[in-house]
Amino acid sequence: MSTAHAARRVLLVVNQRSAEARRVLSEVVGALTSAGLSVAITDEDRDGLAEHGDTGLADAIEVVPAGEAAADGAELVVVLGGDGTMLRGAELARASGAPLFGVNLGHVGFLAEAEREDVTAVVNAIVNRQWEVEARMTLDIRILQDGQVVQSTWALNEVSIEKRARARMIEVVVEVDGRPLSRWGCDGVVCASPTGSTAYAFSAGGPIVWPEVAAMLVVPLSAHALFARPLVVSPSSVVAFELGERDLAVLSADGRRMIDLPGDSRIEVRQAPQPVRFARLSRAPFTDRLVAKFELPVDGWRGRRAGST
């Protein structure tokens, strides 16, 4: 029996259209392979990189089929890009349970752990296994017709249900835990996780929820109703949305998986049993992340300083 140890393996996910991401990819691949780690990318990323003329990394990188099994055997999924690329990385990482480690090369990059200038520290942390894991809840989404589930999907950030015809609103009856709550004439509705509270739900007027708070958010979009405020419900709740007979809508999960909804559709949202695991360099306060990402003004703060009692 061989006593050789299998090589440590990292799956890289890259924003193929970003020249900066392609440069960082080359840097990270070189550093990780020099440290003895095996590096993989998906065939989707390989083809996208080839379209932009980047073919020189092929010999150093294992290519795996894109899909839920892409991260099998990988100890980390490292994302080089913005939040959109992070959401694609989450699709690849979730089934295997591999932690997701993001380097932000986009704009806000709320889901990422590190910035471009931190790449050296990121590589060192990966090589030395110096990260902590934080589990983020996900949403289970089921679409029913005549009481039967006809389609299902999931989301890390949010699921949105929006009108398909620009000229008319849709009628949505909102239900929580088997009881009707209200009917909204609206452009749509968003149901978000705490992770998604800083994404679409936030732009629609919903509250920001700290990641350690287990909850689901319901945020109406341009609703015409007396009671049309954002809701925060229990993570054990089942939230349902029922469309009217003539209401045609489109469902979007994380802005990546789109499903056309016919009239009389029922959509049920609940906490999914399988989270997405994030790799963190440190347990930095979420408040600091908010201040940094949104560039919030905190000048004049005179609160407790380090070492004070």
Image (tube, rainbow, N blue to C red):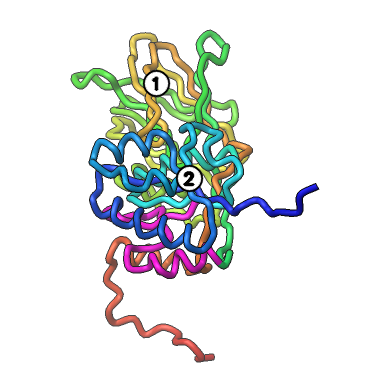
Question: Would residue 164 be counted in the magenta stretch?
Answer: no
Q: Quadrant of the C terminus?
A: bottom right
Residue visible at 38% across and 34% down in the picture: 44
For the residue marked with disc 1, what is the amino acid? Ile
Q: Is residue 27 visible?
A: yes
Counting from the top left corner in percent of width and height, residue 266 is at 48, 18
Which secondary structure, mark 2? strand
- Say whether residue 172 is left or right of residue 19: right
> In this orientation, which residue lies closer to the viewer: 88 or 295?
88
Furthest residue toward left: 167
Using the image, tell me which numbered label, if any, was put on residue 259: 1
Which stretch is magenta?
Answer: 100-127
Residue visible at 54% across and 41% down in the picture: 71
In the rendered view, tell whether residue 308 sits above or below residue 114.
below
Counting from the top left corner in percent of width and height, residue 295 is at 27, 66
- Give the residue number, with chain letter if any, for mark 2: 40
Counting from the top left corner in percent of width and height, residue 230 is at 40, 42
For the residue marked with disc 2, what is the amino acid? Ala
Question: What is the spatial separation of the Cα atoms under label 1 and label 2, in whole angstroms?
Answer: 31 Å
